[in-house]
Amino acid sequence: MGSNDSFREVTSQSWFSRLGASIKSVGFGILLFIAAFPVLFMNEGCAVKIAKGLEEGAGKVISLKEAKVDSANNGKLVHLTGEATTTDTVNDPVLGISENAIRIIRTVQMYQWKEESSSKTEKKLGGGTETVTEYRYVKDWSSSVINSNNFRRSGYTNPAAMEISAETFNAQNVTLGDFSLPKGLIDQITQGEPVQMTQEKLAALPGNLQGRAQLSGNEIYVGNNPASPQIGDLKISVTVVKPQNVSIVAQQQGNTFSPYQTEQETTIFMLNSGTVGAAQMFQQAQSSNRTRTWIVRLVGFILMFAGLSMVFKPIVTLGDVVPIVGSILNFGVSVASFVVSLVLSLVTIAIAWIFYRPLLGIVLLVLGVGAFVAFKVFGKKKQPQAAA
């Protein structure tokens, strides 16, 4: 990266300006803080419902020995494995690719400018700040168009559009044995393999790309030299999803499938690549549910922590008149916000679990109260030391 591809920008903000902004942010912080409670509570309810629904499904599912329609199973949750196949021929008209396949995926990347930035802010005596932001302009491959009009500095211009776009082509009719698969299950078949690029595929390209396209490994390269790409150059690759073995858990509906409605008002509509037993599919679904639950818990905690930090931001800004005082206040506010957010998150989750699963909820509530008491006791022990 040359020296001309980066620059620094220095901006300043007065103490009064910072104080006004921090006061304005208090209202938004309160909204974030309040929003965290329903996010955490509803997440636990959703997690419990999904878990109980999967438990119900695991106890009711019927494993079919063959992929044959049996009217006795209509409306029941069934598990079956077999080859998902199609008689359709899927076409990519631009590249002249025709395959007996479930899906053809054309991927296109363009070489473009990308703006990166990093900032460092220093507090000044009197409460003001000085921020140094370094902007860097690097060239990179991207599957989407980067709008260079929004760059901080001009002179780094990307094309407004790609000369050929990414696109997906799907088979309309996919079957498994005697069953016709609905779109919701077909969309879950994603395991593919690359299509070998040939001179014939180059010849099928639109006229505006002819003469600039060449083979590069298993891709079509549109540009002069793959070893030295230029802004606007393209890389085109294709993936084909061919007929393959899959495993399904869904409700049998005649000769097709639909989502199974559980007593928890959740649905079961699963497809895995390969031959996977019913028990393993449900275990994987339970694992995915736990992962999703923890992610949303983290989101709820972050909302609460960010909200509290914004509420107390004016106090920190007031202390920033003397930078070291502001830094001490900021540390204290951050620790307090973290502890309060952790305790309230645990308590909210516990209340939700008491509502949905009482035994585990009581355990969580005890942990939350214990953490709060420990924080109070620790704080009291620190006070005499500070006074000394």
Image (cartoon, grey):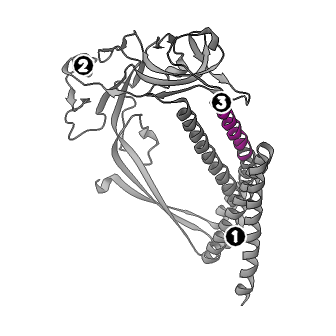
Of badges 2 and 1, the one in the foreground is 2
- Residue 304 drawn at (x, y percent): 70, 54
Q: SS class of the residue under badge 3?
A: helix
Is residue 273 visible in the rendered structure shown here?
Answer: yes
Magenta part of the chain = 40-58
Q: Is residue 148 above or below residue 128?
A: above
**Is 51 within the magenta?**
yes
The residue that appears at 34% across and 43% down in the rendered structure is 140
- Residue 159 drawn at (x, y percent): 36, 33
| Residue under label 1 | 318
Q: Earlier in the sequence, mark 3 or mark 1?
A: 3
Q: Badges 2 and 1: C-beta atoms under 8 Å apart?
A: no
The residue that appears at 49% across and 16% down in the rendered structure is 66
| Residue under label 3 | 59
Q: Of the residues shown, which amino acid type is indicated by label 3?
A: Gly
Q: Quadrant of the C terminus?
A: bottom right
Q: Nearer the viewer, residue 353 or 220?
A: 353
Q: Of the residues shown, which amino acid type is indicated by label 1?
A: Leu
Q: Earlier in the sequence, mark 2 or mark 1?
A: 2
- In terms of image quadrants, where is residue 369? bottom right
Q: Nearer the viewer, residue 327 or 303?
A: 303
- Residue 231 drawn at (x, y percent): 30, 38
Q: SS class of the residue under badge 1?
A: helix
Q: SS class of the residue under badge 2?
A: helix
Q: Is residue 125 above or below residue 238?
A: below
**Is 315 within the magenta?**
no
Q: Badges 3 and 1: C-beta atoms under 8 Å apart?
A: no
Mark 3–mark 1 Cα distance, whole angstroms, equals 61 Å
243 vs 60, left or right, is left
- In terms of image quadrants, where is residue 194? top left
Q: Badges 3 and 2: C-beta atoms under 8 Å apart?
A: no
The 10 Å Cα crowd at callout 1, few under 14, some 14 to 19, many 20 or more, is many
